[in-house]
Amino acid sequence: MNRFKTSKFKNTTPKIAKKDGWINDVRGGSFAGQGNHIKASAELVAFNTEQAGGGMLGVTTVKPAADGRWRLSHVACHSDLVTDLDFSPFEENLLATCSADETVKLWRLCQPESAQPPLAPELTLTPGRGRPELVLFHPTSSGLLAVGAAKSPLVWDTDRRDAPLAVLEEHGEELQSLSWKRDGSLLASTCKDKMLRVFDPRAQLKPVQSADCLRNNKDSRLLWAKDDFLLTTGFDRMRNREVRLWDSRNLSSSLSSQTFGTSGGTLIPLLDADTGLLVLAGMGDTVADCLEVSTSEPFLSQVSHCLSDMPTRGVAAVPKLALDVMSCEVMRVLQLTDNCIVPIRYQVPRKNSGHDFHADLYPDTAGASPAMSADEWWRGGDKQVQRVSVHPDKRPKAAKAPAANPTPARKDHGDSKQEAPRAGSASSSPLSTPSTSSSSAAASRSPSTTSGLSSGFLPSPSPGQAGKAFQNLLGPSSKFRHIQGAVLHRDTHITNVRDLNLTTPGECDGFCVNRRHAAVPLAISGGQIAVFQRSRPGKLPDAALPTIQNSVSVADLCWDPFDTQRLAVAGEDAKIRVWRVPEDGLKETLTEPELVLQGHTEKIYSIKFHPLASDLLASSSYDLTVRLWNLRDGEQVRLLTGHQDQVFAMAWSPDGKLLATVCKDGKVRVYDPRKSAAPLQEGPGPDGHRGARVVWVCDGDYLLVSGFDSRSERGLYLYSAASLSSGVVAGVSVDVSPSTLIPFYDPDTGVVLLTGKGDTRVHIYEVVPEEPYFVECSSFNTLEPHKGLAFLPKSECNVREVEIAAALMLTRTAVEPVVFKVPRVKKEFFQDDLYPDTSACWEAALSASAWLDNADARHRKVSLRPADMTPVSQAPKEAPARKYMPSSFYLEEKTDEQKKEELLVAMVAKLGNMDDPLPQESFQGVDEEEWDD
């Protein structure tokens, strides 16, 4: 009858906090990586936030402040996405983070209400084995970390920062999950190669147990259940999500399994090993299941099913010692969503709940004091953490290191290599990117390597010194760091757009705009193109609109920068058609182009007008050539060769002399079309072959290429235009997404804005010609995926609102204006530091024939300052506010008699002089005899 036993937790009920109990304004977002994106200690909660491109963490408290509100703070941890994080089980404010910048860091966090964030990490590790995806504290030993770096699990003693204690056997594919056994003796892993492995890091580097037992290479998670049992979540061969229970001593087959539907989101398991309660929450889901795990039949029993309002971006369990045990709370889960953190409390309904402690629900749990040091564990120690009661009156106080004061210097282990003969060496990354450069620079500036600072903390500085020190650690600041994107009011939108072509080639931006028109390809036979007037926002009629009938599908299209009525369209029939649109828009369907250009023998990839010369157009094609056309004569004037595969993108240099291309054959090339058909120089491009874009930056000294790396992550790569063969000067990883990042570069500010078709985020960087090369700014997020973002000339920016870029965004049903502003206080003045004289790019500087005859020219410069605005550099200086000393400063210098005299004088001044006649005494009345008796 054992299988029919009744569980005391069978009626456990999830209770979602009311909205006033949510932690708001967190900007959770969706992140790529194996981590849970949120972790909690008994006091603090840390979570991924979209600010600073994912390199920043939000921090708040488990419990609200006295006023019932949560305080949020942010810590700039890394120069790239934080891939995983974990709190120490023994120090509530000690947090480990790992990042795509290929570093692992330890932080001492302050309470969020503290005005001073941590100025530097306590420790920075550089595993040097690729991007670390996982970080996990040891459950019994202090200072011991497991790090999942690409394909290799590493075990680090943080006192010996030069090299790991152990580098375990390299896996066949990327690691997906790591988990320590509760007694700290074994480390288990799952991998994309579908292998489940169990290691004893102190005995050997190879697994003591392994089996090819995971049924799918999609993301999997792993944790230790009771004793020798392992629990995995993943997908079966039919792509159903499943949970499986294993005996770690025999991985040949699972003990039990259960499926949970066909959703594609990874199942995150959270287990309370004391009670056996397991919560499963799927990434992107609004459902959380609670089960009870048992080592006897049935192994998995459903307890409850919880439905929330918003999709899950990450989940974390609150430690046992932070639960409200008097209300019979047996588990608490924190659900990270796009905009808030939602606490979900699991309670067992009991009589006298809130008054009595129900000991049968709360076995003793692991305490907050380590059983031994990392060195003791490495030498074979097997001490276990002392178990403590969770009764409120019996709980020990958890040890917590001070967050603001220097800690003692770490013990010097000069012979650590001799004591750990199996340690692997931490080699540096072969690609020097700004992420790694910045982190290395930060590490070199960190207190661990700075004279007089022994352990990662600065002496308590003044607020001004703290701000400067913190800024130095973050690297150079940008005046555009807090740039803000905004969609303008709905009155400016063009709505009811229908029949959009959502399958334009990757080399096409999706649509194109100029000061007057927006041209949008439609999914209608005949390659039709709609043209909308910017000056006529509003709802489009339901009736059919006049269009341009291109006769074949559109491969790419662009407006002539010097003629707002001329639209060039590349077709899949290897022809370029040039159309003339009436100044006030289409009144009737256009069927005859103004000009047809023929010469390419296969489908055209992309077309680009010359930035200075009128009537000059470049095109690239499947025939692996780039051709230049003189539209005035309707003839091909140059043929460029040398590409071995698909040309992803082209870009003219700012002076119009050179043409750059990036190609699927892995090369970046620069041509001087007037001198040679062969490339002037070439060099290695991005490793990935899924697509790329190129743009000239920093006055034409560098080429910025957006593309993919070998792991299909989107990245930015900077090349010296004078030395392409030298390879990448600097690079930064952006995120994971299938669409190519399309860059828009503003030469006046050095700001580049990037987004891909189908994205919901616009990434913004300032590009500078020296280290760190990329300075990340705030990003802009849209409510739904857009189909394209096309930028307008600088003259369209409203300088009174400090706009530095203006664009039109194409959604599924509308064209919406978007502006990017720099927040400034004195907006009544012209911000001349943001607006240097700009090039009149809407005017041709020379003709195509003149350019072909080797003439060069530059655009004239124009000022964007309105006549009625004064430059902020000439604004009158405000008089400094007078500083008043506190009254005690003056009173301390006076005797008691002086104080009394001053007080009396002040009272008389307030009430008036008693010797002065009262006003009514001067009034005139009647004589006495005139009164009646």
Image: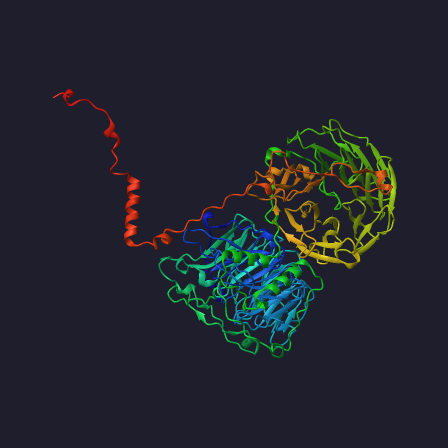
Q: How many marks?
A: 0
Q: Kindly indicate the quadrant of the structure image that contains residue 448.
A: bottom right
Percent from the top left, x then y, of residue 647? 80, 49
Percent from the top left, x then y, of residue 427? 68, 68
Relative to 281, 536 lies left or right: right
The coloring applied to the image is: rainbow
Relative to 31, 402 lies left or right: left
Percent from the top left, x then y, of residue 501? 72, 39
- Relative height, residue 380 to residue 246 (above, below): below
Find the residue positioned furthest to the left: 933
Percent from the top left, x then y, of residue 150? 66, 64
Q: Nearer the viewer, residue 433 or 537?
A: 433
User: Quarter of the image containing the C terminus?
Assistant: top left
- Relative height, residue 639 to residue 407 (above, below): above
- Relative height, residue 123 to residue 906 (above, below): below
Residue 246, visible in the rendered structure: no
Q: Kindly indicate the quadrant of the structure image that contains residue 605.
A: top right
Q: Nearer the viewer, residue 580 or 13?
A: 580
Relative to 129, 469 lies left or right: left
Residue 368, visible in the rendered structure: yes
